[in-house]
Amino acid sequence: MTRAWIMPTLFAACALLGGSSLIRRDVPVGAAVLALFFLFFAWLNSPLAFPRPLTAAEAQRRSADDGRPIVYWRPGCTYCMRLRMRLGRRGRRAHWVDIWRDPAAAAVVRAANDGNETVPTVFVAGRPHVNPDPAWVRDRLTPTA
């Protein structure tokens, strides 16, 4: 759980150090811009940018009921962030499972990827798709009719 917050903490520390350095040099606007830049990346790399994660078992149960995709991800993954940002608001329709929080989820991903924890791995109708195109996933999230 704590390793999910390492990158966001480092970005927040950069915001603090860089901002305070520019404040001491009497450049408050630059300090604010720099701080906002690093705080944005801290948020983007944190688990807060993603919907609340489910356990693998709960996501599988919900997906069986509603047919929505399951996205296995981990904090700090560039490809996961790309997928999440490109899905936009529709991304909340998917069932998101953090493999660092749920060992069973990590096992599901390893089973689908020849023993590797490659994320994002998206399960649609029980079939795994590794690092799929965000447009393809978006199409699977759009309700029909």
Image (cartoon, rainbow, N blue to C red):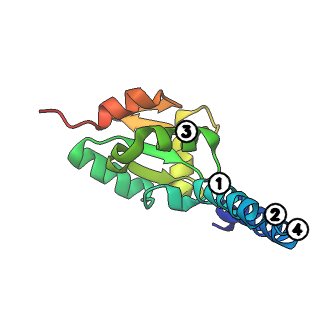
Q: Which residue is mark 3?
A: 82
Label 4, residues with CA under 10 Å away: few <14, some 14-19, many ≥20: few
Q: Which residue is mark 1?
A: 41
Residues at marks 3 and 4, CA–CA distance in whole angstroms: 36 Å
The numbered disc on residue 25 is 4
Residue 92 left/right relative to 134: left
Residues at marks 4 and 2, CA–CA distance in whole angstroms: 11 Å
Depth order, front residue of 86/96: 86
Q: Kindly identify the residue that appears in the image at 78 percent across and 66 percent down.
A: 19
Q: Earlier in the sequence, mark 4 or mark 2?
A: 2
Residue 53, compared with residue 139, is above or below; it is below
Residues at marks 1 and 3, CA–CA distance in whole angstroms: 13 Å
Residues at marks 2 and 1, CA–CA distance in whole angstroms: 14 Å
Q: Going by the picture, which residue comes out furthest to the front? A: 26
Q: Secondary structure at mark 1?
A: helix
Q: Which residue is mark 2?
A: 18
Q: Amino acid at mark 2?
A: Gly
| Mark 1 touches mark 3? (CB < 8 Å) | no
Q: Residue 94 location in percent, x, y?
A: 36, 46
Residues at marks 4 and 1, CA–CA distance in whole angstroms: 24 Å
Instruction: Indicate which label's residue lies in the foreground, 1 or 3.
Output: 1
Depth order, front residue of 18/55: 18
Label 3, residues with CA under 10 Å away: few <14, some 14-19, many ≥20: some
Residues at marks 3 and 2, CA–CA distance in whole angstroms: 26 Å
Q: Earlier in the sequence, mark 4 or mark 1?
A: 4
